[in-house]
């Protein structure tokens, strides 16, 4: 069970992301993972990093994220 939890916890693999950019898109209204938890994870990430905030009332994807997804994907290929 601990191994499964660690596989879901982004802090487990934060050190494996650089030199690639770490990007988070998180809802201020997430009912599963509070925004404060996302801020804590983001603070532990190494630059380059970016945190985008949306106001969806959900956990997971919402259409408000589209602009950030598009921007970050375009930056990857330019």
Image (cartoon, rainbow, N blue to C red):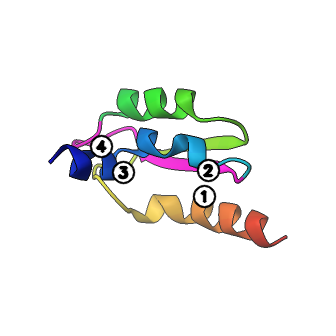
From the viewer's perspective, tell me whether residue 51 is left or right of residue 56: right
Query: Mark 1 highlights which residue?
Result: 68
N-term mark: 3 or 2:
2
Q: Which residues are magenta?
A: 20-33
The stretch drawn in magenta includes residue 17: no
Q: Check disc 2 and report its element: helix, strand or loop.
A: loop
Task: Name the mark on residue 56.
Answer: 3
In the rendered structure, are the residues bearing label 4 and label 3 in contact, judged by CB atoms less than 8 Å apart? yes
Disc nearest the viewer among 4 and 3 = 4
First in residue order: circle 4 vs circle 2: 2
Spatial CA distance of label 3 from label 1 is: 14 Å
Q: Residue at the spot x=32%, y=51% of the render?
A: 8
- Report helix, strand or loop for mark 1: helix
Q: CA distance from mark 3 to mark 2?
A: 27 Å
Residue 69: quadrant of the picture: bottom right
Image location of residue 56, percent across then percent down: 36, 51
Tag in front: 3 or 2: 2
Residue at the disc numbered 2: 17
């Amino acid at each position: 069970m601990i191994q499964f939890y660690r596989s879901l916890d982004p802090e487990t693999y934060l050190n494996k992301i650089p030199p690639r950019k770490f990007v988070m898109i998180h809802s201020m209204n997430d009912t599963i993972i509070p925004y404060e938890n996302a801020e804590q994870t983001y603070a532990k990430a190494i630059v380059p990093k970016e945190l985008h905030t949306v106001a969806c009332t959900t956990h997971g994807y919402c259409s408000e994220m589209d602009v950030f997804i598009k921007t970050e994907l375009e930056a990857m290929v330019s």
